Image (cartoon, grey):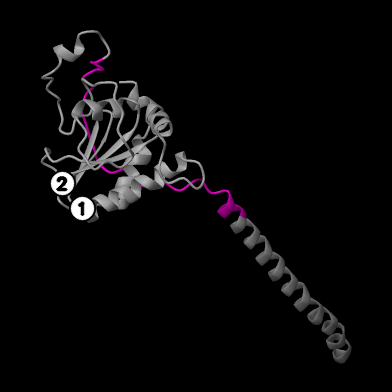
Amino acid sequence: MPKQKQQARKPQQTFAWPVLAAAVVIGGAIWLLVAHIRATTAGPQPAPSVIASTHYPSQGHQGHQPGDLKRYANFRYSSDPPTSGFHREIFSLGFVNANPLPKYVQVHLLEHGNILLQYNCMCPETAAALAEIANEFDSRLLPAGTTQPSHDQLKSAEENGLSVIVAPYPMMSHTIALTAWTRLATMDNVNKADVVSFINRWLRDPDNLSQ
């Protein structure tokens, strides 16, 4: 009788191992599926931090009315480089400029939503680094195979506030200044990540331009 009991138990023991193995495989598959779903449905990653900038309350849009040119000939801007205030309806000669832009031209460009990258040094490497960053944005505005904008293409880009413009500005106390309408950030050396962050944040920003 004992031998018969042992023989009766053997089929149960041999049957249990495949069931256990199958349960482990199925459980592992379910765990991997849940992990995959969680990974693919996770929320977007936080955006990179924006370089700190100083906000200067808008000094208005002087320059549009008859007589403004004479009235505001000695206008005192609240920031240097300027970020708002008196301006004239003049655009730049290029995305990258060899000569400084008058303050009243700078403000006009910012008023439309463009970004200015300016430098105060005899530093070809700094100018080239800023020009390279600007070109990454400005080249998108040009037809394929074009490296320099025509007069009409440049005016259209700046009129619509889509441009990143580079120029020397020897009068300021900073080495490098990034300006948008009512916004100013400065740095001693070109930090591409910070410059790009500033451009992405303030280029043609509708809320900022509404001031």
Main SS of the magenta part reads loop
Element under label 2?
loop
Residue extending farthest to the top is 66
Residue located at (87% from left, 83% from top) = 8
Answer whether residue 38 is magenta in the image: yes
Callout 2: 10 Å neighbours few (<14), some, many (20+)?
some
Of the image marks 2 and 1, the number of the one nearer the N terminus: 2
Give the residue number, with chain letter if any, for mark 2.
175
Proximity of marks 2 and 1: CB atoms separated by less than 8 Å: yes
Q: Quadrant of the C terminus?
A: top left
Label at residue 189: 1
Residue ID at (31%, 41%): 198
Give x and y (percent) for residue 118.
Answer: 22, 41
The span shown in magenta is 37-63
Report the residue at 35% width, 26% height from top.
112
Q: Nearer the viewer, residue 59 or 16?
A: 59
Please state which of residues 112 and 102 is positioned toward the viewer in this rendering.
Answer: 102
Q: What is the number of the mark on residue 26? A: none
Q: Nearer the viewer, residue 70 or 179?
A: 70
Q: Amino acid at mark 1?
A: Asn
Give the quarter of the figure containing the N terminus: bottom right
- In space, the residues marked 2 and 1 are separated at their CA atoms by 7 Å
